[in-house]
Image (tube, helix red, strand yellow):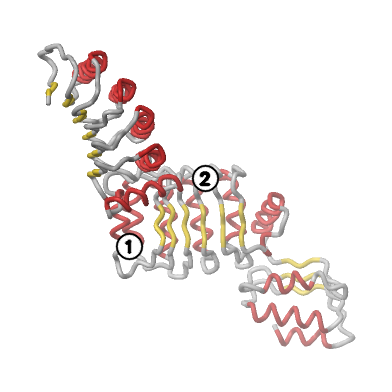
Amino acid sequence: MKIILTLFENVQCRLEKLKLSDCSITEEGYKALSSALRSNASHLIELDLTGNDPGPSGVKQLSDLLQDPNCQLKTLRFLGPAADEGCQYVTGIVGKNPLLLRELDLSEHKLGDKGVNKISALLQDKHCTLNTLILKNNCITEGGCHVLAAALNSNPSNLTELDLSENKLGNPGMKIILTLFENVECRLEKLKLSDCSISEEGYKALSSALRSNPSHLIELDLTGNDPGPSGVKQLSDLLQDPNCQLKTLRFLGPAADEGCQYVTGIVGKNPLLLRELNLSNHELEDTNMKRLAALLQDKHCTLNTLTLCDCSITEKQCLILTSALKSNPSHLRELKLSWNKLLGDSGVKNLSDLLMNTQFKLEKLELVSLHSTAVTVKLKITVYFHKVTMKLKLTVIIFYGILQCLNDLSVYIM
């Protein structure tokens, strides 16, 4: 190509159109072309470079050339028809030529799988050198993932950050995205998949993919998904793998993360990896109860036993606690709230209402030495009887109050 450029050194050259599509021209060639057209006034009005590889700066070199008042170029073609259509579509949304961008944010535009189809031809063209692609909350499903992954696998060397948060990818969609890591040219460093309806199966697939394919990934965001009983441990164990480059593995949103740090500071362990958490004899107060509640309501918290004895829990704090447990009811089997003398009738009623939740799997509720009344105890018995009719086993341990003998109920007086 550099030899062809010598034509422009001839003042008698009248070349107006030059087509160099699919000529294996790289970034070096784009720079040489830009330099030649700046240095030598020419009659060139149309230049076609589709199908070449401009590298990180090639497109900008020639796009800047168009701003030169001495440049006669009217048409500078980088893209084939499909990619050009995608380019115009994106330009219509963001108001800028995406070929000149390093970060493209199309969040909240409800592209859907059809929109992904439109931009896929652009993404796979070598003239598209995006480092960051943000497609948050765009109604993308498994079908869109197929198209997106195929496009990115065709042009993998520039993209370092991909955000697909708040799309209903599910496990099938996420597994398709994971094929990116099978490509040795993949340079992805940050992957954000928060609120993507990923479950335990997806966590296992993710762990397996990152173990099997050494990658550049250093940050992974999975907040708002449901890891099931083993998902968190699968990926936490991955961090111990010497071949794993991950530095940041994010499961929790800001509030839950603050709660996680608070609990870790008390027990010295990450509560996401625990099945039993004992915070007894710590006066929680409203602020710390809110921190704990944010953690408890996150799907990544899979505690089976929660012990909060003698924590000076008030009626207000009990409401905060029960609201959190209603949001994430499926794992907890034992709840111990003994010696919280400020819980009161209202607090125990909130617990009773919680037990009415059919998704709540609690098997043991310990309320030793509460300042309860006969009315409170009656509420406990009513709830327990309701559970019996649903063939669920629940042991309510109570101290203080007046109980009537009911043969069907297994209520223990301490």
Three-letter amino acid code at disc 2?
Answer: Ile
Element type at marker 1? Answer: loop
Where's residue 375, x and y in %?
26, 13
Report x, y in % for residue 294.
Answer: 40, 41
Residue 162 x/y as whole percent: 51, 57
Q: Which residue is mark 2?
A: 140
Q: Is residue 182 left or right of residue 379?
A: right
Q: Which of the labelled discs sits on residue 333, or is there none? A: none
The residue indicated by pointer 1 is 239
Q: Position of residue 284 (x, y in %)?
A: 34, 40
Q: Quadrant of residue 127?
A: bottom right
Q: Dot 2 lies on which element?
A: loop
Compare marks 1 and 2 and give the one earlier in the sequence. Answer: 2
What residue type is disc 1 on?
A: Leu
Look at 44% across and 53% down and name the residue there. 221
> Which part of the image, by quadrant, shows the C terminus?
top left
Residue shown at 66% from the left, 62% from the top: 101
Quadrant position of residue 20: bottom right
